[in-house]
Image: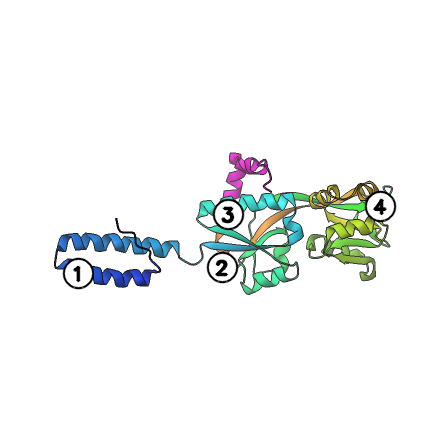
Amino acid sequence: MIKLQLLNSGVLANYLVRLNLTLFSRNRFSSIKLVILLCLLIANVSFAAAPGKTIVLGVTAPALKSAQVQFAERVYSDIFDELGYEMKLEVLPSIRLPIQTKTGAIDGELIRMSNYGKAHRHLTRVDEPSFEFFVAVYGHDKSLNVDSWVDLKGLNVGYRRGVKVIENELTKVLDEKDLVQLTDVSRALRLLSLERLDAYIGIESLTDEYITSQSERIKLSIFKVSRLKEDSAHLFLGERFSFLAPKISTALKNMKLSGRYDEIKNQPKSD
């Protein structure tokens, strides 16, 4: 058996022409069969190497540390595989992430809140939610009374930069001088435990995970005082792959109905 290593379809085509001329004079019928077989091989090689079969999605580092976002990664990896695409993630800072999607440098954003598309018209939302979540208020004083966004007035409030579902609400009711933008959730929790913040507003599931990894002193000095909002997280696609949004939404719905969604959720976390 002769094993051929094909560098590209152009090399293969040239090889075919030479091979066909050599064999044609010896055995016309065998030569034709061989040409047909190798033409089919060219088609397969070209299809496998066709551009656009890989989708690159952006995500921030803090988000990717969340169990829910890691779960969403597994869900969409499964769905894209079924649709014939390979999904890859690119970890980016929160400010750079939307710029990369707008320029087309990446193909979408793995996790954004439901209304994110209103300010980013170049993105198409997958309407079926990846998961639902709550926005929660944390304080160093368990008697802190915050039942609405307005109740935060007059407080020194921290939040993670780039989380627009929180930032948009805070900027409606608080002065800029009362807001503290942070890029590191762990640092925010340390500041809260030291009473340098009156409150921290965060995505409940993500913040709770961070709290469990803190020292006992910090864990014992931080209290979850209320929930302010319920929302849903979605996959957003750039213009290049916007046509896939309805297919992905349907696939995600079917995954939930079939039990595959829960099966993936219950898989043990990989190290």
Residue 113 on the magenta segment: no
x and y, in percent, of residue 139 in the image: 82, 46
Residue furthest toward the bottom? 103
Write the residue at 21% across / 53% down: 34
Q: CA distance from mark 2 to mark 3?
A: 15 Å
Return the mark for residue 22: 1
- Residue labelled with disc 4: 140
Q: CA distance from mark 1 to mark 4?
A: 84 Å
**Which residue is tagged 3?**
248
Which stretch did the figure color magenta? 246-271
Residue at figure coordinates x 35%, y 60% from the top left: 8
Q: Earlier in the sequence, mark 3 or mark 4?
A: 4
Amino acid found under the numbered disc labelled 3:
Ile
> Of the residues shown, which amino acid type is indicated by label 4?
His
User: Which label is found at residue 240?
Assistant: 2
Amino acid at circle 2: Arg
* Helix, strand or loop status at disc 3: helix
